Amino acid sequence: MIQQSIVAIIVGYAAFSVVRRYAPKAVRQFIRKFAVQLARKLSLNTLAKKIEAPSSASSASCGTGCGPCKGCGSSDTAAPSAANTIKPEALKRTIYQIVPPTSGTAS
């Protein structure tokens, strides 16, 4: 029963992540507004502010240099810098913070 609950949570989170990433902008905005309303209804005002914060950053127009048109920066296609890459060691540290490694004994 517990395993099924854990699997259901993982599958639900995966589905939420896919929808959040690939859904049209209108759907993402609706989900964000719904989440803010739910957080406020549950008296989670700090969470509501955190959810609302990214929407104000994305409201910039194309004239400001960075906005919803994704027209930020120059049009040349330079190679990605080292700041945009993830090293395997950093990824392992992140994963181990979420799920600590288990010892070699199985019980």
Image (tube, rainbow, N blue to C red):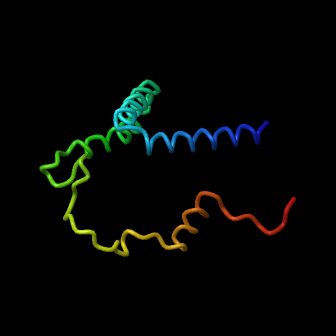
- 35 up-or-down from 83: above or below: above
Q: Residue at x 52, y 39 (%)?
A: 16
Residue farthest to the top, as pictured? 41
- Locate residue 102 relative to residue 54 in the image: left or right: right
Q: Residue at x 66, y 62 (%)?
A: 100
Give the tally of numbered discs. 0
- Which quadrant of the figure has residue 65? bottom left
Residue 37 at what x, y percent from top left?
Answer: 40, 26
- The C terminus lies in quadrant: bottom right
Q: Nearer the viewer, residue 6 or 65?
A: 65
Residue 97 at what x, y percent from top left?
Answer: 58, 61
- The N terminus lies in quadrant: top right
- Locate residue 15 relative to residue 69 in the image: left or right: right
Residue farthest to the right, as pictured? 107
Residue 10 at what x, y percent from top left?
Answer: 63, 44
Q: Residue at x 43, y 32 (%)?
A: 35
- Locate residue 93 relative to residue 6 in the image: left or right: left
- Which quadrant of the figure has residue 106? bottom right
- Which quadrant of the figure has residue 26? top left
- 64 up-or-down from 23: above or below: below
